Amino acid sequence: QVTLRESGPALVKPTQTLTLTCTFSGFSLSTSGVFVSWIRQPPGKALEWLALIDRDDHKYYNTSLKTRLTISKDTTQKQVVLTMTNIDPVDTATYYCARFMDHGDYFDHWGQGTLVTVSS
Amino acid sequence: QSALTQPASVSGSLGQSITISCTGTSSDVGSYNFVSWYQQHPGKAPKLMIYEVIKRPSGVSNRFSGSKSGNTASLTISGLQAEDEADYYCCSYAGSSTWVFGGGTSLTVL
């Protein structure tokens, strides 16, 4: 059974760095064609793709946010970490991690999401 | 990497069919058959409904179907049921190892 779970702070102050962890089970990031991705959704708004990492540690980022994002993985711990620097209130959102399948380009399993509020 | 364009809302009666459009450009939807659709109920995570334009994951009702013409992809739901009421998002590969979602469509079942 594939599961993903996001964890991290619920409240972050502006200008701080946000660190989120995705802990997954039921699959291996060492498998060809299996990636893990981060996607966010501001309250009442649309989904926004953020970043993706594969088994070879190739990293892909949303062009608009690239300078602020870093994605990394710990394959043995089955975790993928996303950091976002210089946080702003507009970054308030539910952050999801999801398994991405390269053979078809789709997000087939999602975590329940974690709401991050940016406020002083 | 601009968001794909979806109608903000659509509605249909029980048992009827509806279609949700997803318009991109020749750089994303028009160039790749990597369009997927997601259903999201309030307070829940998105659920994959369609991938590679027309394919349905195991367990998804065959009432859901996808298509594409030019820069526009579409999701059709036939035989509308109450549980289909949700938000729907399209997603496309946008080249250069980036992906873009649509603005979302709220489906109301009357």
Image (spheres, rainbow, N blue to C red):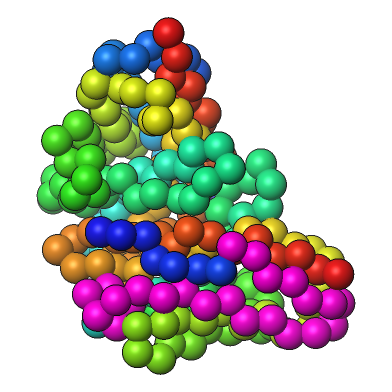
Write down the quadrant of residue A120 in the picture: top left
Residue B97, x across and y down, in percent: 18, 61
Residue A104, x across and y down, in percent: 34, 73
Write down the quadrant of residue A107 in the picture: bottom left
Instruction: Name which residue lies at 23% across and 40% down.
Output: A65
- Of the pair A36 and A64, the residue shown nearer to us: A64
The magenta stretch spans which residues? B8-30
**On screen, residue A95 above or below B13:** above
Is A112 left or right of A33, judged from the image as shown? right
- Of the pair A32 and B36, the residue shown nearer to us: B36
Instruction: Name which residue lies at 49% across and 50% down.
Output: A46
Instruction: Name which residue lies at 14% across and 63% down.
Output: B96
- Of the pair A3 and A58, the residue shown nearer to us: A58
Instruction: Name which residue lies at 34% across and 15% down.
Output: A14
Q: Is residue B16 magenta?
A: yes
**On screen, residue B100 above or below A110:** below
